[in-house]
Image: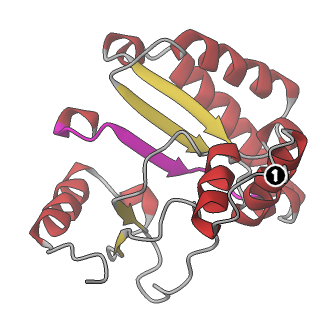
Amino acid sequence: MFSKGVNYVTFWVSSVDNLKNREKSLVKAMHKLYAKKFTELLNDSKIMENKIKVQVCGSWRTFLEKDTIDMIEQLLVKTANNDKGILTLLVAYDGKIERGQAVISLLDDHVLEKNINKDPLTFNSLLKKHSWTGYLPSVDFIIRTGSWNDPHNSADFLSFLTGDSQLYFPEVYWPDFDSNWLEKSLQEYTSRERRKGS
């Protein structure tokens, strides 16, 4: 993706529900997979060579195992000064929780003073600033694999950032989404006319 001129890439790795309400055997397998994949990411030389900054958002510190949390913390520190692209991983992510945390952060910052501009758009900007993903620009394009039969379910994905997003529902499941599917998806996106409601 980064080699194609995309500067921000976000993957929704798991929801809170995936780690909290699934069968124990499945959750255990997911923890093993996370440990393996974050180890690979931490040791992936291409991340540093291409100066990709890795960010992880969600309630991952609550739900992941300590060794995996420590590994993610190392990855965040290791890539903190990279500036050629941002890879965001949503782990134990839930849009409702993100919105709630943004309000808590806003209140904790004591920004709700009497002289604050009461314009709704001002509050919208403040909420975005205090959200987990507030550092990201608005999302241009969402590729949702495995949902072509139910393309109306947003599942609270990045609700602060996706108001004007283009959506694409390829008829493929994530494990089979390869570079050919990526190329096809990007061609579909670039062929569209973006009017943003006008």
Name the colour scheme.
Answer: secondary structure
Please tell me in which quadrant of the rendered image residue 50 appears.
top left
Q: Which residues are magenta?
A: 4-16
Expressed as whole percent of the image width and height from the top left, the position of residue 153 reads 56, 82
Determine the residue positioned at 47% across, 65% down.
162
Determine the residue positioned at 61% across, 21% down.
39
Expressed as whole percent of the image width and height from the top left, the position of residue 31 reads 76, 40
- Kind of element beneath mark 1: helix
User: Residue 91 magenta-drawn?
Assistant: no
Expressed as whole percent of the image width and height from the top left, the position of residue 96 reads 76, 66
Q: Is residue 131 left or right of residue 6?
A: right
Q: Name the residue carrying label 1.
A: 101
Expressed as whole percent of the image width and height from the top left, the position of residue 101 reads 81, 51
User: Residue 11 magenta-drawn?
Assistant: yes
Determine the residue positioned at 49% across, 43% down.
136
Determine the residue positioned at 31% across, 83% down.
197
Query: In the rendered image, which quarter contains the N terminus?
Result: top left
